[in-house]
């Protein structure tokens, strides 16, 4: 674990990585990737498959949620699926009925729900750590608990990444992608020029596979070993 990472964050992050490996065994897990869709943001965890990206923001018991809306907005611009992995300390008390209740107090029923104004709404998923049932009643008794289990993102088939996902690539990666896809670019082209040319000349399929391939091959400080895709 890097020295700058608290044990509180590590326990949530490790659970997230374990789940990503289970649901996307072919993906490369990468920690701490910068994106600049709507301003600089660092994504905590990426799971990069050959043609799909899952982005996860981790909020441990020691974090705050004030930046979460902007972080989610950035991740929506670079991934197929966005997950906010929140420690249960952020859940807020809401009065409810006996079937959804987590506890009873003075004859009234309450559950702990997601806080408002966090940016967590469809299609963003919330994974509450630790993963457990909090409902008073069991499933057999008619109890339900929508935050009890971590919802698995559906596999994406023939779904292009958002165009701004190109913002995750470095200049050399953009230049190499232009070469692979036959897009003309000059030696003095900057990142904006290269990204603009790629968006104009290439299909969503080509860009999605190209972005994923570049990220899977990138040398990173904290990530699974690089994966070189077959030509």
Image (cartoon, helix red, strand yellow):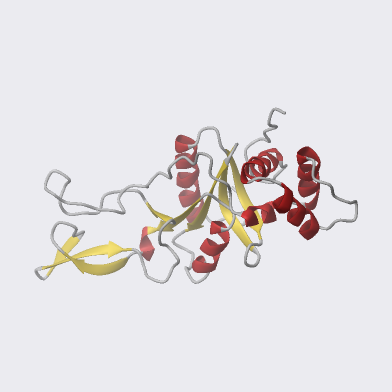
Q: Is residue 218 above or below residue 73?
A: above
Q: Residue furthest top?
A: 230
Measured from the top left, where is residue 217 in percent x and y? 70, 38
Front one among 104 and 33? 33
Front one among 12 and 208? 208
Measured from the top left, where is residue 198 in percent x and y? 73, 50
Quarter of the image for residue 119 reads bottom left
The answer to whether one can see residue 2 in this image is no
The answer to whether one can see residue 144 in this image is yes
Quarter of the image for residue 35 reads bottom right
Q: Is residue 148 above or below residue 209?
A: below
Front one among 84 and 210? 210
- Whether residue 26 sits left or right of residue 176 in the image: it is left
Q: Is residue 46 above or below residue 226?
A: below
Measured from the top left, where is residue 38 in percent x and y? 62, 66
- Whether residue 75 sits left or right of residue 150 in the image: it is right
- The residue that appears at 79% across and 40% down in the rendered structure is 182
Task: Give the number of marks.
Answer: 0
- The residue that appears at 21% across and 52% down in the rendered structure is 144
- Whether residue 98 sits left or right of residue 179 in the image: it is left
Q: Residue furthest right?
A: 187
Query: Looking at the rendering, in which quadrant would you find the C terminus?
Result: top right
Quarter of the image for residue 40 reads bottom right
């Amino acid at each position: 674990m890097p020295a700058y990472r608290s044990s509180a964050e590590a326990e949530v992050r490790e659970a997230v990585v374990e789940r990503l490996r289970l649901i996307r065994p072919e993906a490369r897990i990468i920690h701490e990737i910068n994106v600049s869709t709507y301003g600089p943001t660092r994504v905590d965890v990426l799971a990069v498959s050959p043609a799909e990206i899952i982005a996860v923001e981790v909020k441990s018991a020691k974090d705050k949620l004030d930046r979460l809306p902007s972080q989610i907005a950035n991740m929506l611009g670079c991934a197929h699926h966005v997950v906010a992995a929140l420690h249960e300390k952020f859940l807020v008390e809401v009065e409810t009925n006996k079937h959804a209740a987590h506890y009873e107090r003075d004859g009234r029923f309450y559950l702990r729900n997601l806080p408002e104004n966090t940016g967590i709404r469809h299609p963003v998923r919330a994974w509450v750590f630790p993963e457990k049932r909090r409902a008073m009643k069991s499933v057999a008794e008619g109890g339900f608990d929508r935050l009890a289990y971590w919802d698995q993102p559906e596999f994406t088939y023939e779904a292009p990444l958002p165009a701004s996902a190109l913002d995750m690539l470095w200049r050399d990666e953009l230049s190499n992608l232009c070469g692979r896809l036959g897009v003309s670019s000059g030696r003095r082209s900057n990142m904006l020029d290269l990204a603009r040319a790629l968006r104009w000349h290439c299909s969503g399929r080509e860009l999605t596979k190209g972005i994923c391939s570049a990220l899977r091959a990138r040398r990173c400080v904290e990530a699974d070993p690089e994966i070189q895709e077959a030509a």
